[in-house]
Image: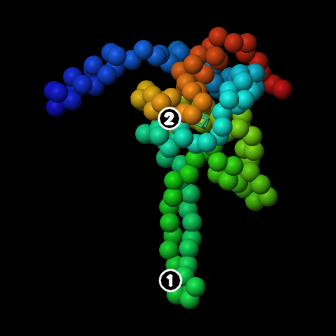
Amino acid sequence: MQAAEAATKAAAESQTRRMVDNIPDLLRENPDHPHWDVVADRCLSCANCTLACPTCFCSDVEDVNDLTGDHTERWRTWDSCFTADFSYVHGGSVRRSTKSRYRQWLTHKLSTWHDQFGSSGCVGCGRCIAWCPVGIDITAEAAAFAAGPQQSGG
Ligand code: SF4
Ligand code: SF4
């Protein structure tokens, strides 16, 4: 137990990146910030970050049956808020653009997760950074909302 705590402490102390303060409020107050377009230009909507993240839990449900119709199964499968189908409601997807999907992911993870679960949805592991094929860094993106112009409306 002591060894585990020491390893955790050492890992925390070796962190070189920091999440900006008040990020829950920054994201809540800036759904139309111009930086969403900037990150959307880079993001491939590949879902790697959500598949690597230890706290992402989005899933889908599929019903399958054999040709006889005698046997049916219901499968729960991994899904991601970065897929177009994830937000499909009758007639189409609610979040059709990469911009809307990235905004959903970051805002849920760092802001509305607090409302839902009483904590951040990010444990600071950095796996989403390591596995992003275009090098998007959640801490850098979050910092952009603290540094850049803040807009509302539009
Ligand atoms: S750094 Fe945060 S958002 Fe990224 S994979 Fe780890 S817990 Fe998830
Ligand atoms: S891993 Fe990177 S490119 Fe892929 S969806 Fe996540 S942020 Fe976008």
Q: Residues within 10 Å of mark 1 (few under 14, many from 20)?
A: few
Mark 2 or mark 1, which has the lower sequence index? 1
Residue at position x 47%, y 38% in the image: 53
Residue nearest the viewer, comparing 87 with 134:
134
Asked whether the beta carbons under mark 2 and mark 1 sit within 8 Å of each other, the answer is no
Disc 2 CB within 8 Å of nearest ligand 2 atom: yes
Please determine whether, in this image, residue 76 is positioned above or below residue 52: below
Amino acid type for the residue under numbered disc 2: Trp
User: Disc 2 to disc 1, how far (Cα)?
Assistant: 39 Å
Disc 1 CB within 8 Å of nearest ligand 2 atom: no
Residue at position x 64%, y 16% in the image: 144
Indicate the secondary structure of the residue bearing disc 2: helix
Q: Residues within 10 Å of mark 2 (few under 14, many from 20)?
A: some
Give the percent coordinates (x, y) of residue 79.
56, 51
Amino acid type for the residue under numbered disc 1: His
Q: Furthest residue to the front?
A: 133
Image quadrant assignment for residue 43: top right
Residue nearest the viewer, comparing 134 with 88:
134
Q: Which residue is mark 2?
A: 131
Residue at position x 51%, y 70% in the image: 74
Q: Which residue is mark 1?
A: 71
